[in-house]
Image (spheres, helix red, strand yellow):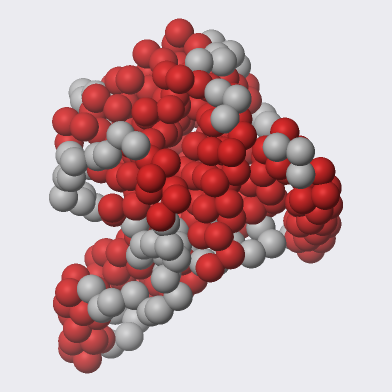
Amino acid sequence: MRCHSRVLASALLCLVATTTITLSAPRPDERVTALTHSLSETEHDHGSAAPELLPILASLAQLRFEQAQLAEATELRRRAMKIAIGSYGPETVPAAEAMAALAHLYIERRDYLDAEPLTITAAGILHDRLGRSSPALAAVLADRARIALARGDVDQARQWAEQAIAIDKQLGGAPHSSRLRTLGLVLTVQRKFADSERVLRQALALDRGSGDELATARSLAALANTYLRQKHPAVALPLIEEATLIDQTCLGPAHPIIAEDFHDLGVVFLAMNRPEDAAKALHTGMDLLDHGTGRDIPTLAYIMLDLARAEHILGHDGKAQSLFTAARRILNAAEDGERDRQRQA
């Protein structure tokens, strides 16, 4: 979805200092109201399991995701997958596309364990039904690359990302920015910084050209990350500032992606030897997760670990130790939970 452009302020610290978290329910969105009404009418006319519901469910799920209503977005995607499987069969293209959409949402929630089997199944169906060169398969391969990168399999991640880009080229168009962004992240981890910067700047140009602000923010954040890894935090700073402000404009106020932006901002400030500013940004990220859907998740733990670094530099060793202990508890619990789920699978 595209958001209206706005002038981005350069002094993000003022924003950090005045950021407030609202606990009230979000105001009804006209788009959500219209889609909900359309969904109700279509259910009345065609039934609650009709394939005519699929495009409405997809649009509504995307809006709910942007509004930080992640549980509702996930349920909508699950419902769409059940309808697609029931209407067309489990090994059909619509079913695979619905699986891929649910998997993509899991990835955006950093739930890679639930996403992976869906991407494997969807990729197999799309390959069998559409061949090796379809946009739908390219999207799934890019998501498989993100999963591989998250679990540390960098070589496999690069292979899938490059396959996705090759499909785009075979179809006669420019690579999709999301595929380029995934490859750029892989190249950054591989410390191939010149290549990663080139690829990510290409993705950013495509995003700006299309007017897709949410995609633009992701490319800005990825580019900031590659500069930070090169120890150029001053170059990374305006990029992550812009990404943060775009996300605050386009996403719900307690969205975990905004929390990740403030985490990145805090890490940049730490690299610039600005621990007080880092602590402000990292506290903001923690507050966003605490008031949203991010309690006791690894993302919160990683923010707490970096905040512990900032507090230690500031001489607040008691706070630093408390944050470190709490972060390790969250990460240990997450690791135990993942092992249990893998055994059950």
- Left or right of 9? Residue 157 is right
Q: Find residue 179 and report its horizontal and vertical position in percent.
A: 39, 31
Residue found 77% across the figure and 50% down from its top:
319
Residue found 34% across the figure and 37% down from its top:
11
61 vs 278: above or below: below
Q: Is residue 162 visible?
A: no
Q: Is residue 279 visible?
A: yes
Q: Find residue 104 and report its horizontal and vertical position in percent.
A: 46, 51
User: Residue 167, located in which quarter of the rendered image?
Assistant: top left
Please identify the residue farthest to the front as the structure is shown. 315
Which quadrant: the C terminus? bottom right
Residue found 19% across the figure and 83% down from its top:
37
Residue found 28% across the figure and 53% down from its top:
249
Please identify the residue farthest to the bottom as the structure is shown. 44
User: Residue 173, located in which quarter of the rendered image?
Assistant: top left
Q: Number of marks in the image? A: 0
Q: Which residue occupies the foreground of this view, 187 or 103?
A: 187
141 vs 206: above or below: below
Q: Which residue occupies the foreground of this view, 236 or 142?
A: 236
Q: Which residue occupies the foreground of this view, 265 or 39?
A: 265
108 vs 25: above or below: above
Q: Find residue 303 and report its horizontal and vertical position in percent.
A: 64, 46
Q: Find residue 124 and report its horizontal and vertical position in percent.
A: 50, 44
User: Residue 341, located in which quarter of the rendered image?
Assistant: bottom right
299 vs 337: above or below: above
